[in-house]
Amino acid sequence: PEQRIFTVNLGVNHRNFYSKSSYYRKAKFRFLFVGTITRRKGLDILLKAFKELNLPDSELVIVGPMADGQAPVSYTHLT
């Protein structure tokens, strides 16, 4: 029935989350990946892109559990 169908928008409420007007320039630029570590999340693409960007004073932080039953994503050319 139509009364049981709902639209759930995925996204950010921009009233609660907004860009800063200025940033501390001497801090590292930090990329953060949060999610289950699995091939379907495209983590291998993120690792390759981060390496190719070769941004000075930056770091990539990966946080999350490994997906059960799947081999971990590996990338050996980070340096």
Image (cartoon, rainbow, N blue to C red):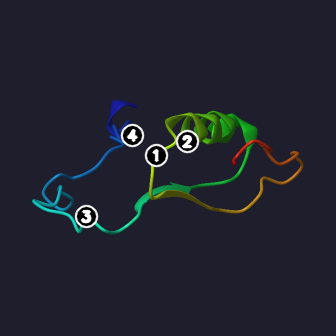
User: Residue 43: image x %, image y %?
Assistant: 65, 41
Cα separation, mark 3 vs mark 4, equals 50 Å
Q: Name which residue lies at 12% across and 57% down.
A: 15
Q: Nearer the viewer, mark 3 or mark 4?
A: 3
Q: CA distance from mark 1 to mark 2?
A: 8 Å
Query: Is the residue under label 2 in contact with that under label 1 (CB below 8 Å)?
Result: yes
Number of numbered labels in the structure image: 4
Per the model, the C-alpha gap separating discs 1 and 3 is 14 Å
- Rendering quarter of residue 22: bottom left
Tell me, for residue 55, which label it has, or none.
1
Pointer 3: residues within 10 angstroms few (<14), some, or many (20+)? few
- Name the residue that disc number 2 marks: 50
Q: Residue at x 45, y 58 (%)?
A: 57
**Which label sits in the foreground, 4 or 1?**
1
What's the amino acid at mark 3?
Arg
Q: Identify the residue under disc 4.
A: 4
Foreground residue, 14 or 1?
A: 14
In the image, taking residue 41 as reference, residue 22 lies left or right, namely left
Is 56 displayed left or right of 25 in the figure?
right
CB contact under 8 Å: marks 1 and 3: no
Number of residues whose C-alpha sits closer than 10 Å to that of mark 2, classed few (under 14), some (14–19) or many (20 or more): some
The quarter of the picture where the N terminus appears is top left
Which amino acid, mark 2? Answer: Phe
Q: Which is more N-terminal, label 1 or label 4?
A: 4
